[in-house]
């Protein structure tokens, strides 16, 4: 279903974004399927960003801009929680220590680092981006923060299609 979705996306607005790109499975698929579309992707974790950059280069994708940034409702520096064995679980660290993992054990031994964050509305304004054809968000619970930071884009209906991967437990945390 995801492959079919990628193939059928419209190029009416020739700009796609992937927030929480991880190693770039979606990024490489989008960029390869739509070579006339520019894809911006955001991945804050240094090691994962390095792998993302390698995948973009190995696939010869010239229509991708990768940024080592988190996206949230505030610009600045945030704590980011890293699990060494499962990069798909990396996320902005929960603010409340009581919500660290709802006692599921996924983050036992996790460490934190600091990452820079941007607000999507500000990023788009600063880069002259008026519309987004497709926006994919996979940020392990910080979904609402990303959407708050896109208030202007959402109010103007400047995003043609959006896909949000939601983990209810991460969202609660």
Image (spheres, rainbow, N blue to C red):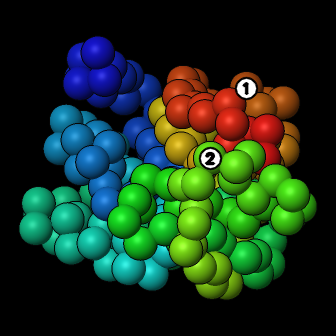
Residue at (68, 43) in percent of width and height: 170
For the question of whether residue 73 can be seen, the reply is: no
Q: Give me the C-alpha separation between circle 2 and circle 1.
A: 38 Å
Q: Quadrant of residue 57?
A: bottom left
Location of residue 108 in the rendering, given as x and y in whole percent from the top left corner: 57, 66
Q: Which residue is mark 1?
A: 157
Q: Quadrant of residue 148?
A: top right
The front one of 94 and 26 is 94
- The mark found on residue 166 in the picture is none
Residue at (87, 58) in percent of width and height: 98
> Which image quarter is the N terminus in?
top left
* In the depicted structure, whether residue 69 falls above or below residue 168: below
Q: Are marks 2 and 1 in contact (CB under 8 Å)?
A: no
Location of residue 164 in the rendering, given as x and y in whole percent from the top left corner: 57, 32
Q: Residues within 10 Å of mark 2 (few under 14, many from 20)?
A: few
Give the secondary structure at mark 1.
loop
The front one of 23 and 36 is 23
Which comes sooner in the sequence, label 2 or label 1? Answer: 2
Residue at (65, 72) in percent of width and height: 80
* In the depicted structure, whether residue 132 falls above or below residue 18: above
Q: Quadrant of residue 166?
A: top right
Residue 27 horizontal side relative to residue 54, left or right: right
Query: Nearer the viewer's eye, disc 2 or disc 1?
Result: 2
Residue at (23, 24) in percent of width and height: 3
Q: Which residue is mark 2?
A: 104
* In the depicted structure, whether residue 52 falls above or below residue 36: below
Residue 63 horizontal side relative to residue 163, left or right: left
The front one of 57 and 14 is 57
Q: Residues within 10 Å of mark 1 (few under 14, many from 20)?
A: few
Residue 47 horizontal side relative to residue 76, left or right: left
């Amino acid at each position: 279903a995801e492959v079919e979705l990628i193939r059928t996306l419209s190029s009416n607005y020739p700009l796609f974004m992937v927030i929480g790109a991880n190693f770039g499975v979606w990024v490489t698929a989008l960029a390869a399927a739509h070579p006339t579309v520019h894809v911006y992707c955001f991945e804050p974790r240094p090691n994962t960003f390095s792998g993302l950059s390698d995948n973009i280069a190995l696939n010869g994708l010239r229509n991708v801009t990768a940024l080592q940034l988190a996206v949230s409702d505030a610009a600045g520096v945030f704590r980011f929680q890293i699990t060494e064995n499962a990069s798909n679980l990396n996320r902005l660290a929960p603010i409340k220590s009581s919500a660290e993992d709802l006692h599921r054990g996924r983050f036992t031994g996790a460490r934190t680092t600091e990452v820079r964050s941007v607000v999507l509305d500000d990023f788009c304004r600063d880069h002259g981006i008026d519309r987004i054809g497709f926006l994919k968000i996979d940020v392990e619970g910080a979904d609402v923060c990303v959407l708050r930071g896109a208030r202007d884009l959402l109010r103007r209906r400047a995003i043609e299609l959006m896909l949000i991967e939601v983990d209810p437990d991460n969202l609660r945390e």
